[in-house]
Image: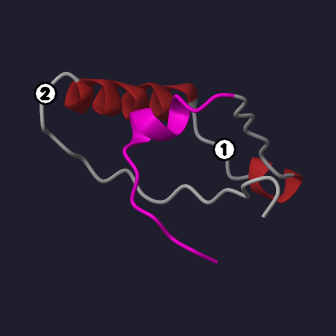
Amino acid sequence: MKANEVALNSFLSQTKIQFIIPVYQRNYDWSEEQCRQLLYDILEVGRKPGATHFIGSIVFIHEGI
């Protein structure tokens, strides 16, 4: 496994990205309010030039590796 630090907007703006949440993780769901708060926090940081905010790790499998 190789870990890299990448800005969230760079990660999400890649072409042909599809997120699939495995069945075993679907039981760990958040309420709508918790999801709304996370999105709000991310958007607020995105509006501040040069600002960063640690949101945790996103683990994904890059197809072809």
The answer to whether residue 53 is left or right of residue 59 is left
Pointer 2 residue: 48
Return the mark for residue 11: none
Q: Residue furthest front?
A: 64
Is residue 50 left or right of 10 when viewed as pictured?
left
* Residue occupying image coordinates x 22% and y 32%: 45
Was residue 4 drawn as part of the magenta stretch in this picture?
A: yes
Task: Specify start and end residues of the magenta stretch as a single range.
Answer: 1-15
Residue extending furthest right? 23
Q: Give the mark count.
A: 2
Which residue is at a point 82% across and 57% down the rendered structure image? 64
**Magenta stretch encompasses residue 13:** yes
Helix, strand or loop: magenta stretch: loop
Amino acid type at image mark 2: Lys
Q: Position of residue 54 (x, y in %)?
A: 30, 53
Cα gap from disc 1 to disc 2, whole angstroms:
29 Å
Outermost residue, bottom side: 1
Residue 18: image location, x then y, percent: 75, 34
> From what the image shows, is residue 65 above or below residue 48?
below
User: Where's the C terminus, which quadrant?
Assistant: bottom right
Q: Quadrant of the N terminus?
A: bottom right
Which sits in the foreground, 8 or 54?
A: 8
Q: Secondary structure at mark 2?
A: loop
What amino acid type is highlighted by mark number 1?
Answer: Asp
| Label 2 Cα crowd, 10 Å radius (few <14 / some 14-19 / many 20+) | few
Q: Is residue 30 above or below residue 32?
A: below
Residue in the image at 87% along x and 51% along y? 23
As displayed, is residue 46 above or below residue 5?
above
Residue 24 against residue 29 in the figure, above or below? below
Residue behind mark 1: 29
Q: Earlier in the sequence, mark 1 or mark 2?
A: 1
**Residue 11 % position (x, y):** 50, 40
